[in-house]
Structure formats: C-alpha cells, structure tokens
Amino acid sequence: MTDIYAGAGVRSKPPKQVDPADGRPDPRDRERLIATVELLFFAYRDFTGEADAVLTELGFGRAHHRVLHFVNRRPGLRVADLLDILKITKQSLARVLKQLVDEGYILQQAGSEDRRQRLLYLTGKGTELADKLAALQIARVADALARAGPEAGPVTRRFLASMIAEAERPRIEKLIFGPDDPA
C-alpha cells in the first residue's frame, strides 16, 4: 500500500509514544497526527454521504439512521438501552422515534413482563430502509479494506476500538460481538 503521508512533508515512520508527563504527543509527530485527524473527517464524510442522501430524500437525518441501524440489529431493543447506546437525551430520541413510528418504519410494543418497557421493532418498510443504508456503507468499507490489503481488517478494528473510551470498550465489544465472541 502506498504511504498516504509520503510526499506531504510528514514523516513516514510511526509516531512516537505520548509523553507520560503531560499526555501530549511528541511535537515532531503533530503534523502526522493532524493529517490522520483530517483523514478521519474526510472518511466519515464519505462514509455517511451516500446514506445521508437517501435519508434526506425521506426527511430524515443521521439520528434516524442510527436508530434504524440499532433496532434492526437488535429487534425488541428497549428504549432505555437505545438511549444508552446512542448517548442522547430522551427528548432527542423521542423526536426521532416519533417520526419513525408515525411514518411506519418502527413499531413500539410494551414489554411482556414489564408493561412500562417500550420495545422497538422495525416494520418491513423499516427493515428495507435499514438494509439499504447498511448496504451502502458495507460496500464502502469492504472496498476500502480490500484496497488497504489483507491485514487491514484486524488493524482497522483495533484502531477503531482504541478510539473508544477505555471504560466503554468492554460494553461496546459486547454490544457489537455478543457476550460469547472474543473478537
């Protein structure tokens, strides 16, 4: 793979460790790290771009996408658990959820054991949209990993997992991979 930093006046070797005294990276690696931050901005822009276009046509945004995604992955997800996953306020979720329910993408049902629980399910229409959005993003990720080479998958997953707050990593890994998968 071509070094994306080559020719940009940025060193090509790995950055130095963070200085334990002040928690900041070696100043000589600043430009390389800024370039990585910028790559994240552009990658996220393009990763979300195609899905955003589909959502915009429906009058939806990224919050709607995240709700559809997690309810699709976990049918019967409790509203309380969705709030915990998304780290948003009840008010923010209520607005998005109301629109998705009103437009026929999500069903809410009371819990069978605790009637106060609200369990979320996608309708056929919701599943179709969630699958369409996922397909766009899966294709982009698959293409990027193929272009990056055979070791890119595990390295990318380690990098992204390392970006998550350390205290949150076990919870997020369990959410993504399940309790029995050592991924």
Image: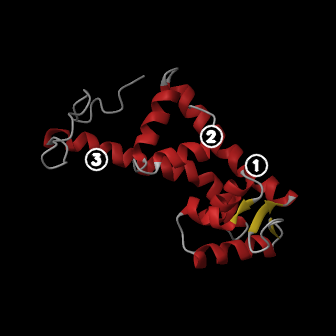
Using the numbered discs, state the Cα–Cα distance from disc 2 to disc 3 in whole angstroms.
36 Å
The quadrant in which residue 75 appears is bottom right
Residue 90: image location, x then y, percent: 59, 76
Pointers 1 and 2 in contact (C-beta within 8 Å): no
Name the residue at 50% across, 28% down: 154
The residue tagged 1 is: 131
The residue tagged 2 is: 179
- For the N terminus, the image quarter is top left
Neighbour tally class for label 1: few under 14, some 14-19, many 20 plus, Cα within 10 Å: some
Residue 145 visible in the picture:
yes
- For the C terminus, the image quarter is top right
Pointers 1 and 3 in contact (C-beta within 8 Å): no
Vertical side of 151 occupied by 85: above or below: below
The residue tagged 3 is: 34
Q: Describe residue 75's horizontal placement relative to residue 156 as left or right.
A: right
Q: In the image, which is nearer the foreground, mark 2 or mark 3? A: 2
Using the numbered discs, state the Cα–Cα distance from disc 1 to disc 3 in whole angstroms.
34 Å
Secondary structure state at the residue bearing disc 2: loop
User: Which residue is situated farthest in the top direction here?
Assistant: 150
Neighbour tally class for label 3: few under 14, some 14-19, many 20 plus, Cα within 10 Å: few
Q: Name the kind of residue labelled 3 in the image.
A: Ile
Q: Nearer the viewer, residue 107 or 140?
A: 107
Name the residue at 76% across, 65% down: 119
**Coloring scheme used:** secondary structure
**Sequence-earlier tag: 1 or 3:** 3
Residue 180: image location, x then y, percent: 63, 35
